[in-house]
Amino acid sequence: MRAPLDPAAGPHADPVPARWERIGAHLGDVGGLSIRRAIPTARRRMIGAWCFLDHAGPADLTPETAMRVGPHPHTGLQTFSWMIEGEVLHRDSLGSEQMLRPGQVNLMTAGRGISHTEESRSDRLQLAQLWIALPDAVRHREPAFQHFPELPSFATGGFDTMLLVGEFGGQRSPVPSHTPLLGMDLSASRAAEATLPLHPDHEYGLMVLEGELSVTLDGESAGASKPGELLYVAPGAQSLKLLSGGGKSRALLLGGPPFGEPVLLFWNFVGRAREEMQAYAEEWNSREDGGRFGAVQGFDGPRLLAPVVPPLKTPR
């Protein structure tokens, strides 16, 4: 997964949420590609174990605007890449080399430490890149990489659905998770309507990637959702109705129980204390071989170095 725009995202200390709220995404550029970042933001750090969500594209690429993200490290998380349009080549310090194509997921478990690169290999690109925070019991595990070329596909009302992770409608994704999670891609090329049952103990985030959707939550209108914003749904909701008035539309629905552990994010690291982040940054910056993170072979370009660690507060 590519580096966050901000050097520090701070601890997981979200305020008590309203029943639902609409949160604007940050706009930025990473690796030469324009992105919308829905989490983390000052108003919402996590949705379940999901602690990072970038939507990149849809964009037409040229050699000057191609995505090229040099070697960079990760700890304490899983990177989850969902390809919608185009192709991206993943390489990592385990020796993995995998092309990610539309309808596929790459899952990289950083654990105690891994490094990787990403390069676009197409003239058009649209993807969602997410992080999943690992619970304390497994966040120092050995790193791993998995590729999932096929995912459950079915109709939900008038929407075509890909089940990225978790269970829904009697289907189960092959993508594993260490905490209960839901990830769904819902798309339509014409007018469509669907009512999705929600788990009342889970929180959810709906991010429209294309088009516009009218949203109703337990019979109450939550207005229209469009690209560039996240609709956060607090625990307690039981149903979400989506209505597309026509044309092309696409949305991601993420969910899971509130994480329940304090989480600290800095640069590409997920941890629990500033001292951890300082040690990770120093090791990566000082060792050409990557230290615990290893080295990526085959990428023609420089490593990305960690910025100075700010005075982060240890989460409680």
Image (cartoon, rainbow, N blue to C red):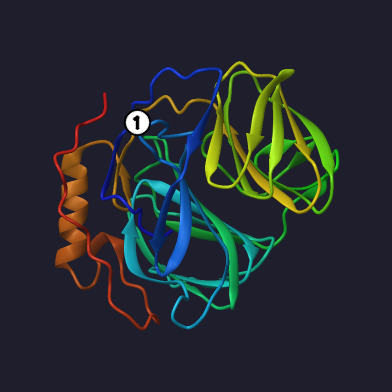
Please name the residue shown 70% across and 39% down the image.
213
User: What's the amino acid at mark 1?
Assistant: His
State left or right for residue 183 relative to residue 158. Answer: left
Please name the residue shown 43% across and 52% down the image.
27
| Residue 55 vertical placement versus 116 (above, below) | above
- Image location of residue 203, percent across then percent down: 56, 26
Please name the residue shown 40% across and 34% down the image.
45
Name which quarter of the figure residue 68 lies in: bottom left
Q: Please state, as top left, top right, bottom left or bottom right, where the N terminus lies in the image.
A: bottom left
Q: Nearer the viewer, residue 74 or 34?
A: 34
Residue 216 shows in this picture: yes
- The 10 Å Cα crowd at callout 1, few under 14, some 14 to 19, many 20 or more, is many
Q: How many marks?
A: 1
Residue 164 shows in this picture: no
Residue at numbered disc 1: 12
Name which quarter of the figure residue 101 lies in: bottom right
What element does badge 1 sit on? loop
- Image location of residue 21, percent across then percent down: 53, 26
Name which quarter of the figure residue 287 lies in: bottom left
Q: Nearer the viewer, residue 115 or 53?
A: 53
- Image location of residue 219, percent across then percent down: 74, 18
State left or right for residue 47 relative to residue 165. Answer: left
| Residue 41 vertical placement versus 293 (above, below) | above
Q: Please state, as top left, top right, bottom left or bottom right, where the C terminus lies in the image.
A: top left
| Residue 277 vertical placement versus 214 (above, below) | below
- Image location of residue 223, percent across then percent down: 65, 29
